[in-house]
Amino acid sequence: MNSLGDNILMTKVKNGDLDKLGLLFERYKKPLFGFFYGMNKDTAVSEDLVQNVFFRILKYRYLFREEGEFRTWMFHIARNVSHDHFRKIKWKGKEDIENWKDRLSNNENRQEEYRHDDEMRLLSMAMDKLPEDRREILLLSKYQEKRYREIGEILGCTETAVKVKVFRALQELKEIYKQLEKHS
Amino acid sequence: MDKHEIDRLISRYNNEEATSAERAELERLLEAGVVSLDDVEVLRTLQSRISRMEVAGPSPAADDRFYKMLSAEKRADRRVDWKRFFSWPEKVANLRLASVMLVVGLVVGYLLRTPLMPANDKQINALSQQVSDLQEMMMLSLLEKGSATDRLKAVNLAEDMNDASRKVTNALLRTLNEDENINVRLAALEALKPYAADSNVRGALIRSIARQDSPLVQVALAELMVALREKSSVKEFQKIIESDKTPAEIKRQISESIKILI
């Protein structure tokens, strides 16, 4: 449990000891990348978005409140960063051919990654087919280690509402998975 | 719904046998907090598998970019400190303290200020002098009036003066000695009390004792002499006691005063 350590580190960053952000980056670059990658399946974009999250943490470090939890605050920022990214894509109207090439290669990578585990490959595909909000809640649940109250803080809803959202997302994931299994 | 029914519902859900109504019921139980997500095995397993989905981390190039950004921010942080100084949200506490200090400074400054500028001081002094002169003039002219009420007003005016001039005290002594009205004389004596420390006034008061024919004024003078511990007045009081005109009660009171003075 790094929560206390996280808050102490972030408080130091807030007070001007910027080097401590390096420790937080090392601690959270992978979960954050996983969250973004789960949302957009694009390695380069996900790396950019991780960078963007830490940029915002630096820029708005004075807004960090010690009584809150750093990880919750960080995922709150991550969610905003992710939404901004999707909005930008929608505004652009279409994605570059290059991005599609990347995605295709990423899918190939995934097939390679899950070569020995059909179940995981199908689950990954099922996750990709989920609507954005359902995928997001399941990823938050994964990276926030099922702490539904904190997820509620990120989403701006109650703990109960989060549980219901997770239930519905899992329900839908289960259905998609079954269908994929049937056709594989 | 009892525990057995809930267990049966969960079991049907786990075995893919639940109807849409039963799924809605399960959702309702979840919302009510009767059932937790981890109680439903199929959901618990699914979540556990999602947790195990490994994703490779960002590339080393991403690390480089982050550390470059961090060092750039550190340089900027050192270089433009004033920028942080004006970033108000983090300075709210400082601003609050600064405003309190400003207010305290203003109050202390106000309290410790030099009373008035010298030029103003001169003007005020000149004005005060003019007011005093006017008061004095009015008092002296009222003392000349035939009405006892006017003369009393004049004496009261003298009492209000903070620092009466010799002219005023002489006028009051004259009133004490010569005014035909006892009340006016008593008021004059009262007005002269603050100036009794002045040797001229004190001498005139002692001399006045023998001139008084009113027992009330005599007793008032005797009390004042006792208060002033003026031993030289004893001779004057002795004359009053020896006089046949003095009432016995006044004699007794003055005798008491003489005893204290001796």
Image (tube, rainbow, N blue to C red):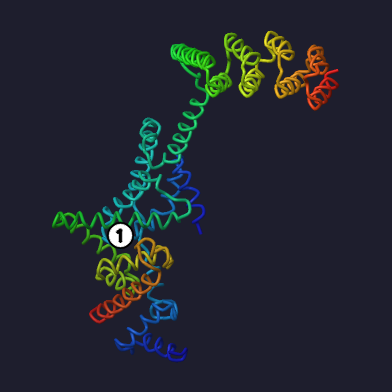
Whether residue B226 is situated above or below residue B29 in the rendered picture: above
* Residue B231 percent location from the top left of the image: 81, 14
Element on which disc 1 rests = helix
Q: Residue at x 44, y 35 (%)?
A: B99
* Residue A98 percent location from the top left of the image: 17, 54
Tag 1: Cα neighbours inside 10 Å, few (<14), some, or many (≥20)? Answer: many
- Residue B247 falls left or right of residue B4: right
Foreground pick, A12 / B256: B256
Residue that label 1 marks:
A37
Q: Residue A58: which quarter of the image?
A: top left
The three-letter code of the residue at mark 1 reads Tyr
Q: Quadrant of the C terminus of chain B?
A: top right
Foreground pick, A94 / B94: B94
- Residue B139 falls left or right of residue A105: right
Q: Residue B256: which quarter of the image?
A: top right
Q: Quadrant of the N terminus of chain B?
A: bottom left
Q: Chain of mark 1?
A: A
Foreground pick, B122 / B255: B255
* Residue B183 percent location from the top left of the image: 63, 24
Q: Residue B211: which quarter of the image?
A: top right
* Residue A139 percent location from the top left of the image: 35, 65
- Residue B161 falls left or right of residue B233: left
